[in-house]
Amino acid sequence: MNNFEESLKEGYAKQIPTNSIRAKSLIKSSQEAINTAKEIPFLDGKLKSIFRELYEGFREFCEALGYIKGYKFQSHEAITHFLSEILKEQKISTKFDRYRQLRNGINYYGNSISKETVTEALEEIPKIIKELEKFLPEQAP
């Protein structure tokens, strides 16, 4: 899957009616995940948990934007294409994909993550979400 059109053709994303109720629920969940990440003690044994929560919050916010724009994602990679091609946010797409790969390394391959990367994510992901809020309808939180 090299682009969003392929994601749609291959079933990794699908067009759906917009769903602001689902979007609001995901936004709330995203905020909770980010807040949880910030509350976890910044210790070596907790870095993966902090990072996973941050990524989860980032992903849920992107999924909320999908519901607002009329898309449902079946893969995280489809979100990368959505950010780049539908929202025209190439830099954010690249960052999302980097965090996706780091998270996959942690979850599926037992990779570790550096304090520097987690510190960067703690700072950067909330800022990116704030930037993406411009795609929310006016009445959304």
Image (cartoon, grey):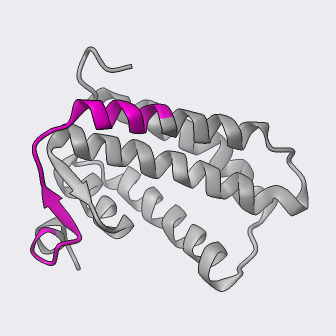
Segment tinted magenta in the rendering: 8-28
- In the foreground, 74 or 5: 74
Residue at the image point whose x is 60% and y is 81% from the top: 108
Left or right: where 87 falls relative to 97: left
**25 above or below 137?**
below
Query: Where is residue 45, by image quadrant?
Result: bottom right
Residue 127 can be seen, yes or no: no
Q: Is residue 65 above or below residue 96?
A: above
Indicate whether residue 33 is drawn in magenta: no
How many tags in the picture? 0
Q: In which quadrant is the C terminus drawn?
A: top left
Instruction: Name which residue lies at 71% across and 79% down.
Output: 111
In the shown orientation, is residue 72 left or right of residue 113? left
* The residue positioned farthest toward the top in the image shown: 139
Residue depicted at 26% across the width and 63% down the height: 81
Residue 47, by quadrant, is bottom right
Residue 90 location (% of width, % of height):
31, 54
> What is the x, y in percent for residue 96?
45, 58
87 vs 26, nearest the viewer? 26
Residue with the most extreme bottom position: 109
Rendered location of residue 4, percent (x, y): 17, 66
Q: Is residue 23 magenta?
A: yes
Q: Nearer the viewer, residue 116 or 81?
A: 81
The answer to whether residue 55 is visible is yes
Q: Is residue 109 placed above or below 104 in the rendered structure?
A: below
Tell me what residue is drawn at x 86 percent, y 44 percent. 41
| Drawn side of residue 113 relative to residue 64, left or right | right
Quadrant housing the N terminus: bottom left
Q: Position of residue 82 (x, y in %)?
A: 24, 56
Q: Which of the 4 quarters of the picture holds residue 109?
A: bottom right
